[in-house]
Amino acid sequence: MARPREFETDAALDSAMSLFWDLGYEEASLARLLKTMKITRGSFYKAFKDKNAVYLATLDRYDRQVVSSTVAFLGNPANGSGRDRILSLLTKIADMAEKDGDRLGCFLCNAMADKAAQGGEIEQRLQAMALRLEAAFQKALEDDLTPSDCESNRAGETARGLLALYFGMRVLGRAGLAGRMARDCVTQAENLIAGFTASGGRVPAAD
């Protein structure tokens, strides 16, 4: 009969994520990971193989917990029009910023800025999450268009602008600045959406 695992995997990954979130990949040494995750070296290697594998597992967990729920919210018509969904998401971030500065920020944003993101499987995971968020913003925008307008539109470029604002707000929160700037970011998002909607999402004709 197999021996029971000596630790609860999800709890250990949450602890590891907190450490990576706070210190970054390089500074989160194996010794610190073992202490934070409260597991033995033997259990660590049996479950995760190495630090890189733990980092990938924390990214996957953040993807399931945060990115997937954000994508689902943006894609659910029950949450209002596409415009309302986008602005509701960004307003929620602004509210957090005004309440406590949003000092925690976004694990995905932190990971993108980390040295660990420079190539390989980690970079691929980060890009995949960012692209899923971009696609969710685009889907929300296109939900407010007529079927004929959806055939040729600039929802992609507008979605990338909204994604940049989303990431920017989370980074500003990490720096303690979002409380002053977050509402301006929401206003810029409103302007982007208004310009997109006013044109019916169409790409401007060439001169």
Image (tube, rainbow, N blue to C red):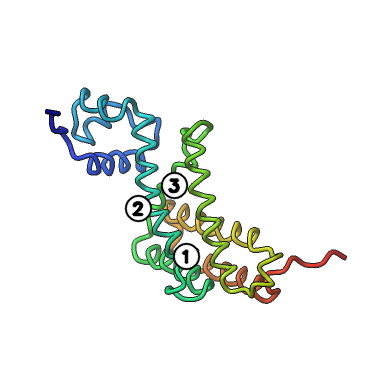
The residue drawn where x is 52% and y is 68% is 186
Q: Amino acid at mark 3?
A: Leu
What's the distance in space between the residues labelled 3 and 1, CA to CA? 18 Å
- Considering the image in quadrants, where does the N terminus appear? top left
| Up-down relation of residue 45 to residue 108 (above or below) | above
Give how far across and how far down residue 63 sits, in percent: 40, 49
Total number of numbered labels? 3
Q: Amino acid at mark 2?
A: Gln
User: Dot 2: few (<14), some (14–19), or many (≥20) neighbours within 10 Å?
Assistant: few
Residue at the outermost front position:
1
**Residue 24 or residue 53, whichever sits in front:** 53
**Residue 92 or residue 128, whichever sits in front:** 128
The residue drawn where x is 22% and y is 24% is 41
Cβ atoms at labels 3 and 2 below 8 Å apart: no
What's the distance in space between the residues labelled 3 and 2, CA to CA? 12 Å
The residue drawn where x is 55% and y is 57% is 135
Cβ atoms at labels 2 and 1 below 8 Å apart: no
Mark 3 or mark 2, earlier in chain: 2
Q: Secondary structure at mark 2?
A: helix
User: Dot 3: few (<14), some (14–19), or many (≥20) neighbours within 10 Å?
Assistant: many
Give how far across and how far down residue 154 sits, in percent: 68, 63
Give how far across and how far down residue 206 sits, in percent: 84, 64
Mark 2 or mark 1, earlier in chain: 2
Q: Secondary structure at mark 1?
A: helix
Q: Amino acid at mark 1?
A: Leu
User: What label does residue 65 carry, if any?
Assistant: 2
Mark 3 or mark 1, earlier in chain: 1
User: Dot 1: few (<14), some (14–19), or many (≥20) neighbours within 10 Å?
Assistant: many
User: What label does residue 108 carry, if any?
Assistant: 3
The residue drawn where x is 49% and y is 41% is 113
Which residue, given by chain and number where applicable, does mark 1 sit on? Answer: 74
Give how far across and how far down residue 53 sits, in percent: 36, 31
